[in-house]
Amino acid sequence: MVVRVFVASCSGFVAIKKKQQDVVRFLEANKIEFEEVDITMSEEQRQWMYKNIPPEKKPAQGNPLPPQIFNGDRYCGDYDSFFESKESNTVFSFLGLKPRPASTGLHLKGQLTQSKADGP
């Protein structure tokens, strides 16, 4: 199964664009295979996304905003859920992926280790 990130390329909201970029950059940096699905270019994909978000995860009013993340047909969550998993170092579990061996670690851990080595 492939991780799919539903985005809106034509969003006028800077916050949405930043959230989308954050998810995509994280996946790229950690070499996690994913597909970006632009809901502004495909009504069919937009409807599929709306239909497959569990009712308890939809906002009380309006439509769910991108980015929305799926692994195949399994709903993973929205940006807030992604961010929480990133902060708690549980992204692989959030995405429904097997954790990587500890030796490779996440890209962010590598940066932290490197910055400590470069320290005073």
Image: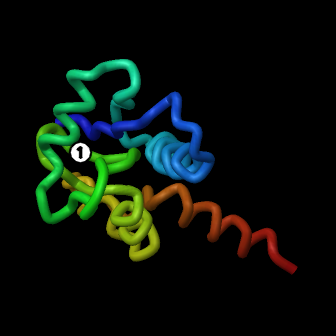
Q: Is residue 30 visible?
A: no
Disc 1 marks a residue whose amino acid type is Phe
Residue shown at 16% from the left, 38% from the top: 72
Looking at the picture, how far across and down is residue 36, in whole percent? Answer: 38, 31
Q: Nearer the viewer, residue 116 or 108?
A: 108
Q: Label 1 crowding class (10 Å Cα cut-off): few <14, some 14-19, many 20+?
A: many
Q: Nearer the viewer, residue 15 or 61?
A: 61
Residue most toward the bottom? 120
Residue shown at 28% from the left, 58% from the top: 61
Dividing the picture into quarters, in which one does residue 21 lie? top right
Horizontal arrangement in the rendering, residue 120 relative to residue 26 (left or right): right
Residue most toward the right? 120
Horizontal arrangement in the rendering, residue 106 relative to residue 77 (left or right): right
Q: Which residue was labeled with disc 1?
A: 70
Is the image coloured rainbow, by chain, by secondary structure, or in one colour?
A: rainbow
Residue shown at 33% from the left, 56% from the top: 78
Q: Nearer the viewer, residue 87 or 51?
A: 51
Residue most toward the front? 61
Secondary-structure class at tag 1: strand
Looking at the picture, how far across and down is residue 114, in whole percent? Answer: 68, 65
Looking at the picture, how far across and down is residue 12, in whole percent? Answer: 58, 38
Dividing the picture into quarters, in which one does residue 38 lie? top left
89 to 111, vertically: above or below: below
Dividing the picture into quarters, in which one does residue 109 lie? bottom right
